[in-house]
Amino acid sequence: MAVDNVGGNGGAAGVQQTGDTGFQNQMAEFERVSQKVQAQAVAMRRITTELSSEKKVADERVQ
């Protein structure tokens, strides 16, 4: 029975290493998605600003 416990402990270390790799992969994916979302937010702010400016010009023409 002691042999089974030692074997189980060795397997747990392998699972921990796999878990660490999985976590690192998740963090890398999170960073990639975060950068993509930030870039989209900047683009949306730029577009919103442009549309707001165009609306102001159009409103002034109507008056």
Image (spheres, rainbow, N blue to C red):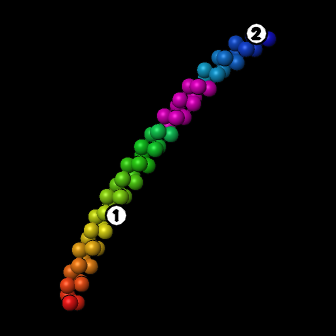
Give the farthest residue toward the top: 2
Q: Amino acid at mark 1?
A: Met
Which residue lies under the disc numbered 2?
A: 2
Give the farthest residue toward the bottom: 63
Q: From which residue to which does the magenta span run?
A: 15-25
Asked which quadrant contains residue 11, the reply is: top right
Give the farthest residue toward the right: 1
State how far apart marks 1 and 2 are (Cα): 62 Å
Asked which quadrant contains residue 40, the reply is: bottom left
Which residue lies under the disc numbered 1?
A: 44
Indicate whether residue 24 is drawn in magenta: yes
Q: Is residue 14 left or right of residue 45?
A: right
Of residues 48 and 25, which is closer to you in this image?
48
Q: Amino acid at mark 2?
A: Ala
Magenta span main SS: helix
Q: Residue at x 20, y 90 (%)?
A: 63
Of residues 60 and 7, which is closer to you in this image?
60
Q: Could you tell me if the residues under marks 1 and 2 are in contact, i.e. CB atoms within 8 Å?
A: no
Give the farthest residue toward the front: 63
